[in-house]
Image (tube, rainbow, N blue to C red):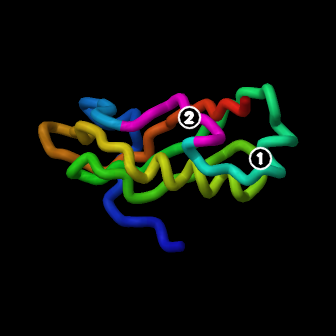
Amino acid sequence: MKEPENIVPLKEATYSPNKLSGKSKLTADTLKISRDLRTKYKGQVLTVRGSVLIDEKGKVIRVRVQKKLPREIKVRVSKSLIKWTFVPAEKDKVKVKVWYPVKVTVSFK
């Protein structure tokens, strides 16, 4: 997939993004994780780290999940992250696209 243009490195932004909505504590139930994976990770809390590409309007337009996890968990977490919204980053009073690090936890009962 081709990288979007005009992405500003986060460290060059005058103001970093600020999360408006999105849950960073998730459960296997809310993510609708399969029974097999619920059994495998029963009683555990997984920390999933990644990055989201936030556009000039504060919308997440891409997600990268960095931890080695089963594909199903990565896909479900990505679908949750894509719904997050932010106050966009700014550089010199202009709203810009940035990759922003995120961390979520997934609890398995």
In the rendered image, residue 38, in percent from the top left (x then y), is placed at 78, 42
> Left or right of 3: which side holds 69?
right
User: Which of the pair 72/85 is nearer the observer?
Assistant: 72
- For label 1, the SS is loop
Say which quarter of the image contains residue 26. Answer: top right
What residue is drawn where x is 44% and y is 40%?
Answer: 100
* Dot 1 alpha-carbon crowd within 10 angstroms: few under 14, some 14 to 19, many 20 or more: few
| Of 45 and 39, the residue lying toward us | 39
Residue 27 magenta-drawn?
A: yes
In terms of depth relative to the viewer, which is nearer, 28 or 13? 28
92 inside magenta stretch: no
Q: Earlier in the sequence, mark 1 or mark 2?
A: 2
Start and end of the magenta stretch? 22-29
**Numbered marks: total:** 2
The residues bearing labels 1 and 2 have C-alpha atoms spaced at a distance of 18 Å
Q: Is residue 102 left or right of residue 18?
A: right
According to the picture, the residue beneath numbered tag 1 turns out to be 68
Mark 2 Cα shell of 10 Å, populated few (<14), some (14-19), many (≥20): some
Disc number for residue 26: 2
In what quadrant of the picture does the C terminus appear?
A: top right
Which residue type carries mark 1?
Lys
